[in-house]
Image (cartoon, grey):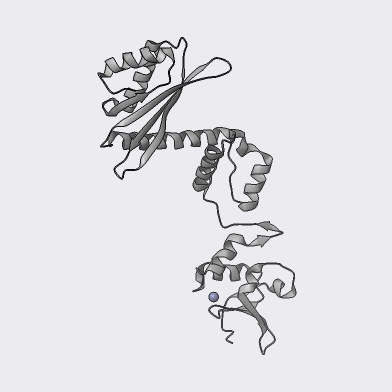
Amino acid sequence: MSTTSEDTLDFEEAHGTTKSGVWSFYIKSTTDEGKVVSECKYCQKVYIAGSSHGASNMRRHLRSQCPSRNSPEVLEFFVKSTSGGAVRSVGCNQVEYREALALSIIQHEYPFSYVEHEGTRKVHSVLNSDVKHISRNTVKADILNVFHIEKRRLLESLRSLPGKVSLTSDFWTLITTDGYMCITAHFIDNDWNLHKKILNFVYVEAPHTGPAISKEFGDLMSGWGIEDKICALTLDNAIVNTTFSDTYETLLNLKDFC
Ligand SMILES: [Zn+2]
């Protein structure tokens, strides 16, 4: 074994005074001159005890100099190297973190305050000590951003659709008697896949007369720009829907409403 390296290190670990896992990548030995040295298992780079830099030289060699610095074992070590029982990491992709948080809240319908819960933040800190916690207002803005991106994608796919769109409109009434209109689109794409998308779920001010609903519906559809692609409009048998469909049918001069 060669001991020609100029790099030296503090050998406190050789005496068991530190717990750095970096030693699992080195072989400890003693030279003929009685010096305690460490040799990299991968490239045989040798460090001599005596520096005050602790294990930092060995860590730096593994991270940026060793030919095996990109091996799975080394990468995993730097991701999960431990200190005092807490997991540390080499960094946090904050953009990816915020996007994943927003999507999880959408998927599971968590409240925005979820991101401010003490237990939630504790879990995220354990997983990555570099994480920057966010507020409910930040995650709300992130979710709205996701909404606008997805809406733009749907808009583009609807406008480039070669076929027609079938719409369904239904009213939901809250216990407070507030009325909401839900408009769902069914369409088939270029690959013959059937899609079902909610285009709008909006509060509609009373009174919910046929002409009023027709106007609201027309305004929403013009926002999507798909009036020329509507082939059918399916409604339930509420009396106001007869006026609604008649009014809208006349407006668009369509004949195929059901
Ligand atoms: Zn090495």
Q: Quadrant of residue 41?
A: bottom right
Q: Quadrant of ligand 1?
A: bottom right
Residue 81's place in the image compared with 181, above or below, is below
Q: Nearer the viewer, residue 236 or 213?
A: 236
Q: Position of residue 204 (x, y in %)?
A: 46, 16
The answer to whether residue 198 is seen in the rendering is yes
Residue 242's place in the image compared with 202, above or below, is above
Q: Nearer the viewer, residue 87 or 113?
A: 113
Left or right, 81 with reference to 166 = right
Q: Nearer the viewer, residue 163 or 226?
A: 163
Q: What residue sits 27% from the left and 35% below the top?
A: 163
Q: Position of residue 228 (x, y in %)?
A: 26, 26
| The residue positioned farthest toward the bottom in the image shown | 32
The answer to whether residue 215 is seen in the rendering is no
- Give the position of the N terminus as an image quadrant: bottom right
Q: What residue sits 54% from the left and 36% below the top?
A: 139
- Give the position of the C terminus as an image quadrant: top left
Residue 42's place in the image compared with 161, above or below, is below
Q: Nearer the viewer, residue 189 or 72?
A: 189
Q: Quadrant of residue 155?
A: top left
Numbered circles on residues, count: 0
Left or right, 181 with reference to 21 = left
Q: Quadrant of residue 80?
A: bottom right
Q: What residue sits 67% from the left and 75% below the top?
A: 50
Left or right, 205 with reference to 174 = left
Q: Position of residue 11 (x, y in %)?
A: 69, 74
Q: What residue sits 74% from the left and 72% below the top?
A: 16
Q: Position of residue 9 (x, y in %)?
A: 64, 73
